[in-house]
Image (cartoon, grey):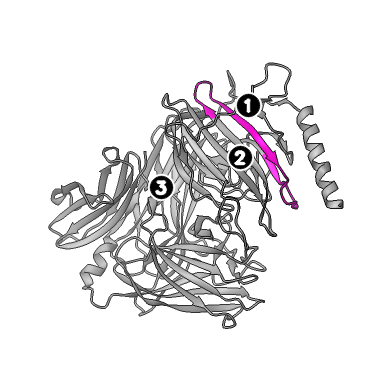
Amino acid sequence: MKKIATLLLICTVSINLLKAQTSGGPDVYGYTWKSSLDLNNPPVYNWIDIVPLSGAQNVRFLSDDNVVGSFPIGFNFHYYWYDVSQFWVGSNGYIGFTNGLTASPFPNIPLAGGTNNYIGAMTSDLVFNSPLINGYAPDTAECWRWSNAAGDTLIVSYINVPFYLSTLPNYTGNNTFQIILSAVDSSITFQYKEQIGTTMPTAGNVMTMGIENNSGNIGLMPYVNTYPIANFAIKFYYPANTTYQVSDAATMSNNNPETGGQFISDLTPSPYVMNTTIKNTGNQNLSPFNVFSRVMDNVGGIQVQQNMMSNALTPGQTQNMSMTTTWNPTTSGTYTYQSNTQSAGDLTPSNNSKIQELQVVDTTTANIRLSYDSGISGVIGGLSWTGGNGGAGYYFVPPFYPCYLTQLHSYIEADPNAVGFSMEVYDDNGVAGAPGSYIDSVTMAPGTVLVSAWNTLPVTSPIYITSGGVYVAWSMNGLGVALAEDSIAPFSNRTFEVVNGTWANYRSRDMLDFLINVTIQKDPNAGVTEVTMNDYFGEFSPNPASSFSVLNYDLPADVSTLSYEIYDVQGKLIQNKNLNHEIHNIRLTVNSELLNAGIYTCKINVDGNKVVRKLVVMK
């Protein structure tokens, strides 16, 4: 009875707060907000049922604490001083303009660091219809998105979505609400049709509502730890005028869109090229500024470095840069590629730098172990999900092709109930290079797990890899088993949390790595040229791409023929080109504007040898 009384008190306080505070702002940029309870020209609650509308799309694969996307907004939406054209949907009641997970306990808005650049209508511990502990969230939990034909309105609706509950039946309450973006006046509206029940208490915020900019230093939070009432609306108004001037240059990525770690052979004949993507993320024109790139070893020693001036950039403009100074790794070990924008008067220095982890591996041995961790379990307790059926994952791209994947490794922190664990392997042929086809699964039987030690599981049969990479998942087989985590930088940005088959970027991937490794072997039947020719080519950057994508290469002097072919996912030839006159131009450029959105395979032919690279095109 005491618990019920407490919950009733919370609900009563929440409703009173809603009635007491009906408008607010401005933030430093100029946004203001009003609720439908305001007495001065309030927004009118008017629920829009988008499910039956033409073009409405069901947002599939939402689960517990995950993010799916990206999806096109359908127009350029003006948000703070920049335009956004795509969004991600978070299962916890928010949409983001970058791919980031926000989970309980929820941060105040605004807050620099962590996930920024998002709109939270009811950011709380919600759950969709995927298996949890021993039950399921109701099948009625849905999320839909819809952009109108006029290209000025986006609506994302959460329908009949409950709160997560750690005990049976694993869900509680019911919530139906929507987020509306309007290009007509650059406004943002939250509408709440139904709100029943309360979420689990935690040592922090259980619910926030608000908007936050891309650096996390500006935003509005009308309500925190406050449950909305039914038939209620909140509207955020874009400022008619703003004096807030933003000079901001950002490093968006190094070598791939996620700045994901990379394995490099110590015998590669092709030098490592420092590629970086920068952007004017402010609202003022930027004069050319310096971009400083360098590769460093694990004690801070600079291997190579270069300063290069950017172009003059207008607000929102992006530039891809390839440094002319290259690096020839010869000693195995941990390195980092760091790139910094150095624009005078930069407002948000937190987005100036990106760090990519580079692991140079000794490829002369028979068994080559690929690892992004330091080998040290640095987090007390490790990773163990409530309910005993969660997991973790990595994306591994080998340093050469072809190769065989032969073993999987995981360091187990604890297994108090002797439940064991499993590991699975998936191809990267899913949408936009996500986990796709299932390849293999192996299990460490209950009672056989080595605790505070590495556990090795041979795959059922060697997995042959000729291009791309593989996703490797670690899965709990019951309560208590814990995977070790590494808190020593650098971090790979290749980690995922895997719950009931749903993959999402690990919420702490910028601070932790998992102790999951794989072992590969060379193909003994592959000729030396076939094995090493691949090492003369980098990866497409940017990737995904919307306009142009560049693949760097550096071929031996005796190469006489070079061409490429691009195929779509159905195997249809889309483009082909003879590059014999460009053999030593060091760059292969693909005009992505000529391609539809999708995944493409680029087959490069070098004197009868083939090199394969994947390219993702987004519109």
Q: Amino acid at mark 3?
A: Thr
Observer-nearest residue: 284 or 375? Answer: 375
Q: Amino acid at mark 2?
A: Gly
| Mark number displayed over residue 37 | none
Q: Which residue bears the numbered disc 3?
A: 276
Query: What residue appears at the point 26 percent right and 67 percent down from the top-left corner?
Result: 532
Q: Disc 1 or 3, which lies upstream in sequence?
A: 1
Marks 3, 2: nearer the viewer: 2
Q: Disc 3 or 2, which lies upstream in sequence?
A: 2
Q: Which residue bears the numbered disc 2?
A: 216
Magenta segment: 181-208
Q: Which residue bears the numbered disc 1?
A: 235
User: Relative to 482, is 516 on the left or the right?
Assistant: left
Q: Secondary structure at mark 1?
A: strand
Query: What residue appears at the point 51 percent right and 61 percent down from the top-left corner?
Result: 300
User: Relative to 532, is 337 on the left or the right?
Assistant: right
